[in-house]
Structures are given as structure tokens and as C-alpha cells.
Image (cartoon, rainbow, N blue to C red):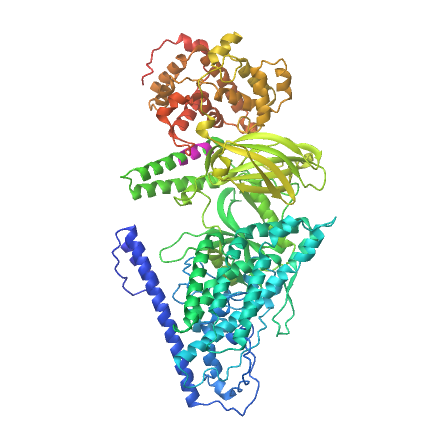
Amino acid sequence: MWDPKEFEQHWQAEFPGEEAPVMRLGSADDMRQELERCRENLKRLQQVLAEEKFKVAYLESSLSRQQKPVPRQRRKVPPPPPPKRVSMRDLLPPPPVIAPPPAPDPDYEEDGGHTESFVLGNLLEGLRVGLLLAPAGDSPRHSSPERSSNGYLSSDREDDDSVDFNYGTDGYDAEGNEEQKSSREGSETMPYIDESPTMSPQLSARSQDSVDGVSPTPTEGLLAEGESESDKGLLMRKLVLSGVLASEEIYINQLEALLLPMKPLKATATTSQPVLTMQQIDAIFYKVQDIYEIHKDFYDNLCPCVQEWDNKTTVGHLFQKLVSQLGIYKAFVDNYKCALETAEKCSQCNNQFAKISENLKVKGPKDSKEQPTSVTMEALLYKPIDRVTRSTLVLHDLLKHTPVDHPDYPLLQDALRISQNFLSSINEDIDPRRTAVTTPKGETRQLVKDGFMVELSENSRKLRHLFLFTDLLLCAKLKKATVGKHQQYDCKWYIPLADLVFPSVEESEPIPQLHATPDHEIEEMKAKISVLKSEIQKEKKSNKGSSRAIERLKKKMFEYESWLLLFSPTIPFRIHNKNGKSYLFLLSSDYERSEWREAIQKLQKKDLQAFALSSLELQVLTGSCFKLRTVHNMPIISNKDDDESSGLYGFLHVIVHSAKGFDHSANLYCTLEVDSFGYFVSKAKTRVFRDTTEPEWNEEFEIELEGSQYLRILCYEKCYDKSKLNKDNNEIVDKIMGKGQIQLDPQAVQSKNWHMDVIEMNGIKVEFSMKFSSRDMSLKRTPSKKQTGVFGVKISVVTKRERSKVPYIVRQCIEEVEKRGIEEVGIYRISGVATDIQALKAAFDANSKDILMMLSDMDINAIAGTLKLYFRELPEPLLTDKLYLAFMEGIALSDPAAKENCMMHLLRSLPEPNLMTFLFLLQHLKRVAEKEPINKMSLHNLATVFGPTLLRPSEVESKAHTNLASDIWSHDVMAQVQVLLYYLQHPPISFSELKRNTLYYSTDV
């Protein structure tokens, strides 16, 4: 809530010596109303400031002309403008017939007087928005949008988070060009919309020296004395339209350059050696031809209107027609991500297309002698996005300088309304444009990728934020925020990409001694987080739930999640500076490691030079990181808004069918990852398909989801070189052939039918099917209706039929696991192939003679999965419905002696087949846990896997204490885990000893 003291403290830090305004804001609604009022005041003051600046410039100009007229007999050529400074006059096409301007008086210029050119420059300063609507190849030194001196964006778009960074704004330039800052001071209330190609994502630096090539506009006679305010407005209107025309020409040239390779690509698509398929071509160039035709038609109709200018000329109908076709842009925006991904994948797979896409030629304006500039396809694909997001700006300026009684006024009003409505409907779909940082020497440095990562430094884990720029990798730590100051990063180290290398496994040093976090601590932390999450939900639903209590719980959950994020990663990612030190990061997923490595290697393909940053350069670059970052928060639940999806909880059934697109035979397998508690974990792995280009696995897996939103599939080539194997405990030496991910759409996967899909990765296509079932549905027990078979039949019936104390299926599965699977990493945690499990289930149900043969040949994870499935499908839990509440209450007892008596008595209360089977399983699980250093399965891990399976009550009993399906770690589930863990940690329990002990302890605890 509102804290007046904190506000006053921040105010005094920002405005020393000034008394803070008093605002009585008692609720969130009061704060929203005050915010709207402040925004309205800001708009009004910006308008007043712009008007006053206009009057000052105009009056100074008029006075200077009266005091010192410009001699007209002198015809010297005026000096050229300073380098890398493009004025408004450079952006305007020449009017049809206007005499050349008089030469300025050199003495007059030295005195700092105001010539007509200077006045025009000031008058036109405010038109930058309208005239720079489309990319114009401006200096790379500018960035968009520029902040005004009051700290707010001087823009019609209220984007408080959109900030820029460049050396020019700080007045720092290694070459001493101080004009960069002063040239903008006259327009600090207007947004500087930079259309430079260097502002587009990862644009080739070859374009940075290009300029618009639009002929300068002579200034003589533009502001004649005695002209009316209406005439001035109409003159400004013409200048805005001239700028629109110039920018349209540049935009059309860019679209032409983008379309140029489309026809030859389509021609080859039908041949025996296509560069791209028709489907790929359609994805990359989707709607570009339509956009080109719309703007070519607009340009052809607007051009004669501007060339034959008349104050009565109307253009509103042209803009109305243009905005009525903006729906084409919606289709383009929706396909934009697909177009980029397709182009990138095709570039990786086809060198011919890669060369084409890296070097598209954009011609200059027709009246200029400028040579065509080289631009990447990625940059050109961004141009329509860039243009449509600014479509309202030119209409706003045009309307501003159109008299209310002009025929165009209502047409432009309507066009502006349509444009604004369209923009508001697609704004959420458009990714923010990457901002470029310009180095002091004028080179373009862009942020390509950033994210949180755990660095192993001095034998301890440190949370870092890694920033990958086009020429360097920077590792930073977020400083603690101090009152009155913006949060900033502290640079820990950086490596120029020219000096960065990835050491191979055999070259790298072993990981320093690392105290790995025990699995049970990780699981316990997950349990604590889930309890807090449940408590937060209860507080929100409670009418008396206080915001202070919720914030306290969220703060605690943030601490727990941060700990989990820091201590769960184990996969090493090494980076080496060939001039010195090596650095080691720990990741939770091989997918992330591959992404970072590929992004760095892609940049290293360019001609990079080694360099060293000065302390000032490093300070400024690090200061930019806070503004440039794209990952703002750690990927944890407590950072999510209440309306964000909490993900899926339950079981995802996935069948990995096959893969195609490999260029050579290899030993291939896939792994499946899902996100859980903010990071990705590997959940399943197919068998290795040997020596093939088209593996057909057809393996089904059941993957447990804990708030998951994404499924990843990674395709590997198996490495059998023993010299490379397991140098480090968690090293992955197999080669990634491809990787991809899909978002888990609840509506798509929650249907009862299988949903088939394809993930494309580096030219490889992996086919798979999936369906989702909630945790309640997966673990639901149904009353026993069958007397034959073993699955779904009461354990007492099975043991009586078999004349055994422990069911045959339990004995055989445990025997096989102990024979060859007790050292298997993740035994009972890693999913077995579902089809194998179903085959074993059918064999046991039919009492097949081939069971022993099948068990010896079957993958060990499938056998472990069969055992879990047997207990899960019992019509009543092994520890019985009758005793369920007693177990829940017994484990909650605080007194150790009372708990011991209660828990032992509950075991004695079990039916004999249930007790014998439970003790048999208990001893087996203890033997598995003894191999924890090898199989990574602790007692806690095993209790987590088996606890709910052995205790979860049947459907009838569970109705009384059902929990939210989304809360996988409900209080009941946690208690179920704790019950089994108690017995696993207890000294050996024998059946005979239990029966001899006749101590009575009521189950009604």
C-alpha cells in the first residue's frame, strides 16, 4: 500500500531541498486515479512546452532577420553538416520549383546568429516523429525512443519501460564529437524515432554508414513574412507529407529487396534440387507481397499530390484506404515468429540460402547516387513490424497541422482512430525491439541473449546474469538497490568473443570439489514451496485474508525458490578465455547449454577482432545492461502475476514415434524435459536406435508434471568413445543433433484422445503424440470388479489364489531390479516405456509362461514402472482405506515415543498379505537407497515415488479430503511421503517381532 514516508524519501533524493507533495492515497483505486491525473498533467505540460519552444524559435528568427538581413549577392556554398548528424532538411525531397537558397554570411554564423536555415531547423525539429515513420538508414548512434530531460518518454505512446541507451546521450564520444548531445536539446520533448537498420535485431553492421540519400530541401521562401497561422499549419502539413513520401520510398525499396529472392526460390522449389520447399517459402515471405502492393499503391497516389501541392489538396482518403488494409499486418505479425524461425533453420541447413539471406541489397532513393546497401533478411523481416507499431505517429502529426475546417480533418481523424484500435489489438503480439549500444568508435553492439545462470566461483554457487552481445560475453551481478537510486549491475568479468573458446571434455579440468545438494533436500524444499503456495491460495480465498500476510508468505516462497534455483543445477558449462582464466557455470538442462553455445558460435562466425574495454567503456556498458535486459526476473513462481498460468499438474503421456532428416547414419536417442519449479529437468529417455537415419522408437512414457508449461525434446547421437565418458559426474558427452520445445496447451492436451505433433529441429523432424491426465485421475482407485489376473484385483484375493504371502508380480519385479537395476541412475524415478509396461501387465494378468523370459529381456525402467503400476491400480491402497486417517494423524504426532507406538501399532493392524508385502517392499527400497551414490535415489526420493502410490485412498474414501489438482504437493501428499519415509528410516522391522509385541495402542489417535 501507499507509504507517504517512503515516497517523501525518494522525492527528496530526486529533488533535493524541495518539499514533497502530499498525496492521501488510501487504496489501490486512489493510486490509479492519481496516476491517471499525473499522466494527463504530463501530456498537457509537454504540449505547452512544445508550443513555447516553437514560439521562441520563431520569434528569435524574426528578430534576427530584422536586425541583420542576409546579403543575397553572395553565393558561397554553405559548409557541410557535422559527420553522423542528419537534419530534417536531409530527409525532405526537393519541392518542384523553388529557387536555391542564399549563401549564409560567414561572419554572421561566427556570431552565432539565427539564419532562416536555423529557424527552419528549429521549426522542423518537432516533425521528426512524422517524417521518420519508416526506416531511413540514420546514424547508428541514435536509439529509440529518446528520453526527455524530465525522465519521461516524450512520446504519444505511454511506454514507461521503454528506455534507450547510447554513448551520445551521456555526451561521451571517444572521437570528441560533443554535438551529438547538443543537437537534441532543442527537441527534448519530442520522441526521436530512430529507423536506422542497426536498430533492428542483429542487423549486419554493414548498414551502419548508410544515409537516406534524400535531397536537401531549399529553405528560401518557406516562411515568408506576413503569412497567417493557417498558412504556416498548411506548410507544416506539406513538410510532414514530404517526409512520409520519402520514408515510403525507402520502405518500398526494403520490401522489394526482401521479395527479390522469392521468385527464383519458388522456381527452384519445383525442380529436383530445391533450395527451399514451397511450404518454407510461404512461411518466410507470408503476406510480404500484399504489404508491398498496398504501400506501392499508396505511394503512387500520394506522390502527385505532394509534387503538385496546393493548400486545397486532400490526402485523407489515401490514409483512410491505407489503414483500412492494416489487417494484412495482423496476419504478418501472427506469422512473424514462424517466418524468423523458418529462415534461421533454413540458413542452418542450406548454405546457399544462408548466403542469400545474409546479403540482400537495398537500393537508395531514385534521385540519389547512393550505392545499394547490404542488409540481412532478418532485419528486413522486422521492417513491417517496426512500421506498423508507429502507424499512428504520422497521422497524429498530420492531424495536428490540418485546420479543423479542412476537408481532410474528419478523414484523418477516422484513420487515426482505426490505426490506434488496430495497434492496441496487436501490441501484445509484438516483441519489443532489441536496443543497440553504440561503442565510442561508432561500432554497433547489440544484446543478443541474456539470462540468469549459476556460476561456480571459489567452490561456491553464485547467481549471475549473463549478457551476450554481438562482440563480447559479460557476466554481471545485480547490486542491491539503494534508496533513491536505480538498480544497477556490477560487472564480474567479460570476454571478447574473439578470445572465447569452449574446451572439450578431454581438455577441460575436472570440476572442483562441489558439495552437491542431496536430493532429499531438493525435494523437501519443493514441498515447502508447495505448502506456501497452498497457504497463499487459502489467504486469497479467505475474506479476512490480509495483504500483509500474503506478502509475508510470498517473500518466504521467493527465498525458498531462489535457493532451489541456486542449488538444483548440476550440468557443467565451461567457458575459457584463451588469454587466461576459465569459468564454470552449472545448468539444469542440456537444452540451455546448447542454446548458449550455439548463440555464441553463430556470432563467432563473423570477422571478430580482439579488444579491451577501458574502465569507462566497461562502466557505461554495464550500466546499459539494466535497461537492455530481456529477462527481468528469475524464473520462479513468486515472480508470476496472479493471472499467469500456473501450468499443468498431473501426468503427461508421450509417445515418441520416429525422426527424419538426419544426413548420416548414427546411434540415435531422444530425451524429454519439462519445466518444474522454474527450471527444466530431464524426465525420460528413449532406447538407442543403432546405425540409422530414420529411427522408429514408438516408445510411450508417463511424465509427472509439477506446474509444467513446456515440453522439450532433445535428439542425441550416442558416444561410445570410452575416453570421453563421465569425466565429470554430470557431464553429457553425447552430441546434440537437434532440439525443440512446444508449449503445453491445456485445452489441446487435456482431451481424452491422443494429440499428434511434430517438432522441427535443425532440419530434423521428430514425430510424437501426447495426452494429459490429472493427478487425481491417474491415481484414482476403482472398486475391484475382476477376480482374474493381478492388476486391479485385491491383494488378498491374489495371494490366496497363488497361495503366497507376497504376490508373484511383486517378488519377480523386485528380484529383477535387484539383479540388474539397483545401480541404474534414477531407478523408479525415470519413466519406463509405457508400451513395455503394458506388455508386462498383460503377461502377468494372463499368467504367461514367458514372463521370466520377458523380464530378462525388458528394459529395467519398464520393470520398475510395472511394479509401481501394480500398486497404483490396487482397488484399495496397500496400507488400506480403513487406516488412512490414522496414518495421517500418527505421522503428525510430535512426541517420538507416542509416534513410535502409534506407527508400529498401525502396521500390526494391517491385514497379513498387506503387511508382508509392505515389509518385503520396504527392505527392497532400503537396499536401493544403499546404492544412492551410484543410482542417485535417496530414501526421500523413494518415499516421494512410492508414498502416494501405497497410501492414496480409493475414490470413495478420498472424496472427503480431496485437494486441488494443481497442488501436487498438498498436505495429504506430503503426509503420505512422510509416512513411508518414517518406515524407511526406521531400524529393520520384522513380521515376527511385530506380532510378538502386543502393546495396545488405539488407532483413534
Q: Is residue 719 above or below residue 479?
A: above
Q: Secondary structure of the magenta portion, mostly?
A: helix
Res. 541 in view: yes
Q: Is residue 908 above or below residue 730?
A: above
Where residue 254 sits: x, y (%)? 60, 63
Q: Per the image, is 523 magenta?
A: yes
Quadrant, the C terminus: top left
Kindly indicate the quadrant of the structure image that contains residue 646: top left
Which stretch appears magenta?
A: 522-529
Q: In the drawing, does residue 745 fall left or right of residue 738?
A: left
Front-most of 390 and 922?
390
Q: Per the image, is 46 magenta?
A: no
Res. 500 in view: no
Where residue 882 sits: x, y (%)? 38, 16
Q: In the drawing, does residue 712 fall left or right of residue 158?
A: right
Q: Residue at x 41, y 80 (%)?
A: 58
Front-most of 74 and 753?
753
Q: Residue at x 56, y 42 (%)?
A: 741
Where residue 417 sits: x, y (%)? 42, 61
Kindly indicate the quadrant of the structure image that contains residue 814: top right
Count of number-bearing discs: 0
Q: Is residue 102 above or below residue 696?
A: below
* Extreme-right residue of the structure: 272
Front-most of 4 and 26?
26
Where residue 207 sits: x, y (%)? 61, 65
